[in-house]
Structures are given as structure tokens and as C-alpha cells.
Image (tube, grey):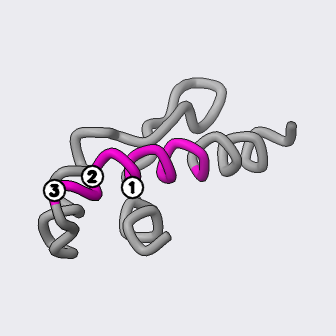
């Protein structure tokens, strides 16, 4: 959750609104928060779940 919160300003936006997170920012946040490399896959999976839920909310679905 903390990693996702730190990515709050990293949304890619198209003509119809937000389309997803800028995944290029994720490694930087993981490093800054000292997330262990063996946790990266699980953290990324959690980010994707939260991303899809946030997109549905932002796009009124």
C-alpha cells in the first residue's frame, strides 16, 4: 500500500482520462522505500490490483 501511495503522481493520462501507472517509476520507489528485491514480484502484483481498482473508480466503472 505504501508503494502504491508513493506512485500517486505517476498516472499516465490519455484523451479519455487515466490509463495506468507509469511503471518506470516503480523501481525508483521500491529502492527509496528499501523494499527487498525478493519482495518485488509480490509488491508489483499488489500494485496492479490497486491500479485496476483505482482505474475503475476514476473512470466511473
Where residue 36 sits, quadrant-wise, is bottom left
Q: Secondary structure at mark 1?
A: helix
Q: Secondary structure at mark 3?
A: helix
Q: Position of residue 42 (x, y in %)?
A: 40, 51
Q: Of 49 and 57, which appears nearest the observer?
A: 49
Category of crowding for the residue at label 1, using alpha-carbon neighbours closer than 10 angstroms: few (below 14), some (14–19), many (at least 20): some
Residue 47 part of the magenta segment: yes
Task: Identify the residue at the far right of this view.
Answer: 61
* Tag 1 near tag 2, CB within 8 Å: yes
- In the picture of the structure, the residue carrying the numbered disc 3 is 37
Residue in view at x 16 percent, y 56 percent: 37
Residue 61 part of the magenta segment: no
Q: Position of residue 41 (x, y in %)?
A: 33, 45
Residue 25 lies left or right of residue 32; in this view the side is right
* Tag 3 near tag 1, CB within 8 Å: no
Q: Secondary structure at mark 2?
A: helix
Q: Which residues are magenta?
A: 37-50
Q: Of 23 and 10, which appears nearest the observer?
A: 23
Q: Earlier in the sequence, mark 3 or mark 1?
A: 3
State how far apart marks 2 and 3 are (Cα). Answer: 5 Å
Secondary structure mostly seen in the magenta stretch: helix
Category of crowding for the residue at label 3, using alpha-carbon neighbours closer than 10 angstroms: few (below 14), some (14–19), many (at least 20): few
Q: Of 37 and 10, which appears nearest the observer?
A: 37
* Tag 2 near tag 3, CB within 8 Å: yes
Residue 12 lies left or right of residue 19; in this view the side is left
Where residue 59 sits, quadrant-wise, is top right
- In the picture of the structure, the residue carrying the numbered disc 1 is 43
Residue in view at x 28 percent, y 58 percent: 39
Rendered view: 55 above or below 46: above
Category of crowding for the residue at label 2, using alpha-carbon neighbours closer than 10 angstroms: few (below 14), some (14–19), many (at least 20): some
Q: Of 25 and 2, which appears nearest the observer?
A: 2
Q: Which mark is residue 40?
A: 2
Amino acid at each position: 500500500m505504501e508503494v502504491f501511495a508513493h506512485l500517486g503522481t505517476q498516472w499516465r493520462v490519455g484523451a479519455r482520462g487515466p490509463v495506468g501507472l507509469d511503471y518506470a517509476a516503480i523501481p525508483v520507489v521500491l529502492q527509496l522505500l528499501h523494499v527487498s528485491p525478493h519482495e518485488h514480484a509480490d509488491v508489483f502484483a499488489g500494485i496492479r490490483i490497486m491500479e485496476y481498482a483505482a482505474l475503475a473508480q476514476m473512470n466511473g466503472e
